[in-house]
Amino acid sequence: IEEYGWKGVHLILSSMAMNICICGLLYRDSNALILFCVVKRKMHVKKHQQKEQLSDKERLTVPIRKRLHLYIFKNINFNLYILSHTLSSICKDIVNRYTVTKALLDGFSPKQSYLLLLCLGTSQMIAMIPLTFVTDCKCINRLAMCALSILASGSVLFLFPYCSSYTEYITISIVIGITHAGIYVAKYTVIVDILGTGAIALATGWINTIEGLGLLIGMPQSGLLFDHYGANGPFYLAAICGSIGGVVACGSLLLTKIRLTRSTDVIEEDVTAL
């Protein structure tokens, strides 16, 4: 820290997370894997026939485009959802890395400071148990639950820099842990609601890849804020990222409702016409 500062330290730590991006690109659903094998076989059969027709650039870009399965980004809801989760992952990582440091700088003992992480993790673990049952209820909109959790997580973090007593630290840590539980529980169920069951692994891989890139960019910025503005700087960044992520997730929810309303109107028109 004395040699590179917080910015340099988090740049090094974030670069270690690049394996998340690589591993995420390797995620494949069984259907996508079968499709890729069929396409690869057909390309191998027609290799000599297309050799003179395709340029070197086309020969490289066609397989790469099919291997990455970029068609998944044609879904606007998925794009908004993955952006909101990237911002919320930056928010969550900042909380996990700077909570103890801020408590120590505010004069609390190491035992009290690390107890905050225990409260955060325990509250998240306990809250996940009832939330898993909540997400199974048909009357619950899982995307709305995820959006509200992200928005609440970011909003609460605006209060973190103003904590003065240890009770306030404990209370906010518990609330943040509960909101993180809501985000995590709804994370993969919302993918099914948006894309269906046929692209779970592919969507999860892309989410992990883009979240890894977000951490690579966001964490050094939090270290830069810490170097210039002290321990409160990263928490303001986390609060802004969480709030924007919640608004983006709400935008995805609104878009879903608009599409559902339009499809319902079309069905009613067809029924009336019949």
Image: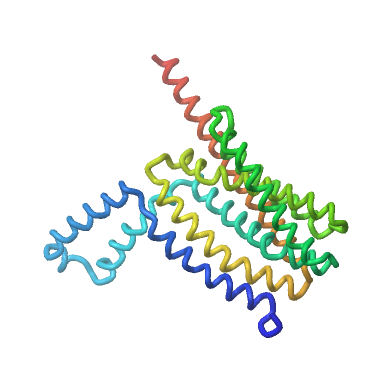
Is residue 180 depicted above or below 215 in this figure?
Answer: above
**Image location of residue 241, percent across then percent down:** 66, 57
Q: Give whichever of 135, 108 is nearer the camera.
A: 108
In this view, the residue farthest toward the front is 111
In what quadrant of the picture does the C terminus appear? top left
Residue lying at 62% horizontally and 54% vertically, measured from the top left? 88
Residue 132 visible in the shown view = yes
- The colour scheme of the drawn protein is rainbow
Q: Residue furthest bottom?
A: 3
Residue at horizontal 16%, vertical 67%? 51
Q: Which quarter of the rendering shows the N terminus? A: bottom right
In the image, taking residue 23 as reference, residue 17 lies left or right, namely right
Q: Residue 235 placed where, x, y %?
A: 73, 61
106 horizontally vs 50: left or right: right
Question: Who's the residue at 40% across and 51% down the image?
Answer: 202
**Residue 199: image location, x then y, percent:** 39, 46
Say how many tags the image has. 0
Rendered image quadrant of residue 267: top left
For the question of whether residue 254 can be seen, the reply is no
Query: Which of 136/225 is in front?
Result: 136
Q: Relative to the observer, which residue lies in front, 10 or 250?
A: 10
Quick check: 41 left or right of 213? left
Quadrant in the rendering for residue 59: bottom left
Q: Position of residue 96 (x, y in %)?
A: 67, 61
Say which of 229 and 51 sits in front.
229
